[in-house]
Amino acid sequence: MTSKTPSESRTTMTDMVLPSETNALQNLFGGELLARMDRAASIAAGRHSRRITVTASVNHVAFNLAVPVGSVVTVEAAVSRAYNTSMEVYIDVWIEDRYNGKRTKANEAIYTFVAVDETGKPTEVPPIEPETALEKERYAGALRRKQLSLVLAGKMKPNDATELKALFTQ
Ligand SMILES: CC(C)(COP(=O)(O)OP(=O)(O)OC[C@H]1O[C@@H](n2cnc3c(N)ncnc32)[C@H](O)[C@@H]1OP(=O)(O)O)[C@@H](O)C(=O)NCCC(=O)NCCS
């Protein structure tokens, strides 16, 4: 399979925060943001694989800044690393200042998607070649994140997570 770049999967979704999507503090409800990120990441994984994709795992979410009602929120997702049938998708969330257009990073998340056929069976995805410094950094850290996710899901023995172990022994 011919390799692709992260920019070929990059997906940008901009939307407003409506009152019905907020919590008691009138900030965006966490579950609503998770859904928006899942949608953008699903499109990115689909663009990379050109297959049906399913969310296999939410590996990391950091709600660093509250997102007030009325905010213009941009969710940007791109595949950061592809394996055999799975893909790590990195998601950045930005808030746009209404008056000067300046963007502030509010949140980020990392999801794992798996490409499947019509019967739901995992199917191969193209390899990926990172281009920019940030894409290379995310690519390099992805294998230990995959191993951590598999260990936590009980799908990999901790002893086999060599990349993850190296993080603590270096
Ligand atoms: C995700 C799913 C397809 C994996 O099926 P499976 O039978 O476990 O398949 P495998 O064990 O062969 O795993 C397939 C790939 O997913 C990866 N994977 C599975 N679980 C993972 C996890 N928790 N974290 C990271 N990667 C995971 C495997 O490492 C493998 O990757 P690779 O082929 O690139 O090396 C299956 O569990 C499923 O359909 N889950 C439901 C998905 C869904 O409905 N999501 C929406 C929830 S509302």
Image: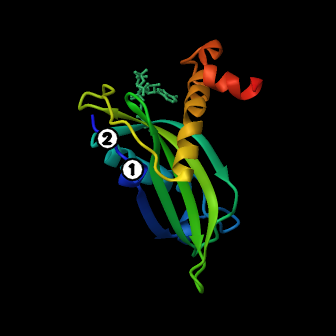
Q: Amino acid at mark 1?
A: Ala
The quarter in which the C terminus is drawn is: top right
Colour convention of the picture? rainbow
Which label number is shown at residue 49? 2
Q: Residue at x 65, y 16 (%)?
A: 158
Question: Which quadrant contains ligand 1?
Answer: top left
Q: Residue at x 39, y 48 (%)?
A: 5
How many other residues sit within 10 Å of disc 1, few (<14), some (14-19) or many (≥20)? many
Dot 1: what SS? Answer: helix
Out of 168 and 77, give the one closest to the viewer. 168
Tell me which corner region of the image, top left, top right, bottom left or bottom right, holds residue 153: top right
Tell me which corner region of the image, top left, top right, bottom left or bottom right, holds residue 147: top right
x and y percentages locating residue 30 in the rendered image: 61, 54
Dot 2: what SS? Answer: helix
Q: Residue at x 56, y 17 (%)?
A: 156
The relative height of residue 37 versus residue 158 in the rendered view (above or below) is below
- Residue placed furthest toward the left: 118
Mark 2 or mark 1, earlier in chain:
1
The quarter in which the N terminus is drawn is: top left
Which label number is shown at residue 44? 1
Which label number is shown at residue 120? none
Out of 81 and 93, give the one closest to the viewer. 81
Q: Residue at x 60, y 30 (%)?
A: 144
Out of 50 and 35, give the one closest to the viewer. 50
User: Would residue 34 be found to the left or right of residue 128 on screen?
Assistant: right
x and y percentages locating residue 74 in the rendered image: 51, 66
Q: Amino acid at mark 2?
A: Ser
